[in-house]
Image (cartoon, rainbow, N blue to C red):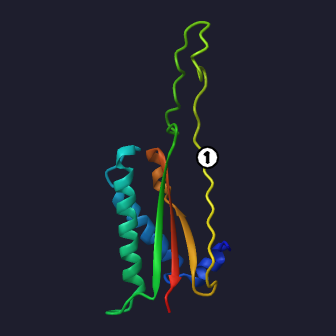
Amino acid sequence: MASLPSSQAQSTAPIPIPRLTDIANDACDSAFESVTSYEHASTSSWNTAIINTTLQNLISESSHSGQQPLYKFAVTSTIIQHTTPHSSPVKDVPSNAGSQDAVGAGSAVGRRGMHSASGAYWDNKKDGMWNFKYEKAESKGFDVVLSILWISIV
């Protein structure tokens, strides 16, 4: 299994990295156009919209007219809720004097951390992976991370 350095992703990408960035930003912009904050019930539809829009654009831009694409693509979208918006920290939990069940009283909950890693066994000259963080989601109380994987079929 090997991970792909970002410089190698740029050299094997079927679409230039600046255009991949535009595709990812456009898909996220469209999915979150009217969203003001994290809504867990909506995450499935947001992820579906982001993935489908991204895949459609990847296939369209990597295919020659009337021909099958030269790559297979996989797109993952991860939405991570902030435990507290940056602008409004969690208020102290009211506590009963001397009560032991007021866990967290007087403390604010911070953001969750996340670490993700990927690996693959592939042709390092043709295949690759690229990761992207959608910066505009930060102000809405969540993070969005996309991974795009391409595998040459020629």
Label 1: element kind: loop
Q: Amino acid at mark 1?
A: Gly
Measured as percent of width and height from the top left, residue 108 is found at 58, 29
Nearer-the-camera pick, 54 or 48: 48
Q: Left of 122 or right of it: where is 91?
A: left
Nearer-the-camera pick, 10 or 81: 81
At 63% across and 62% down in the image, what residue appears?
117
Q: Left of 30 or right of it: where is 105?
A: right
Q: Which residue carries the number 1 mark?
A: 113
Q: Quadrant of residue 101?
A: top right
Asked if residue 32 can be seen in this view, the reply is no
At 49% across and 82% down in the image, what residue appears?
15
Measured as percent of width and height from the top left, residue 93 is found at 53, 20
Q: Relative to residue 99, is residue 50 depicted above or below?
A: below
Nearer-the-camera pick, 109 or 34: 109
Q: Residue pushed farthest top?
A: 97
Q: Relative to residue 18, is residue 116 depicted above or below?
A: above
Measured as percent of width and height from the top left, residue 57 is found at 38, 76
Measured as percent of width and height from the top left, residue 125 is found at 62, 87
Q: Residues within 10 Å of mark 1 (few under 14, many from 20)?
A: few
Q: Relative to residue 11, is residue 85 depicted above or below?
A: above
Asked if residue 117 can be seen in this view, the reply is yes
At 33% across and 92% down in the image, what residue appears?
65
- How many numbered dots are placed on residues in this image? 1
- Image quadrant holding the N terminus, namely bottom right
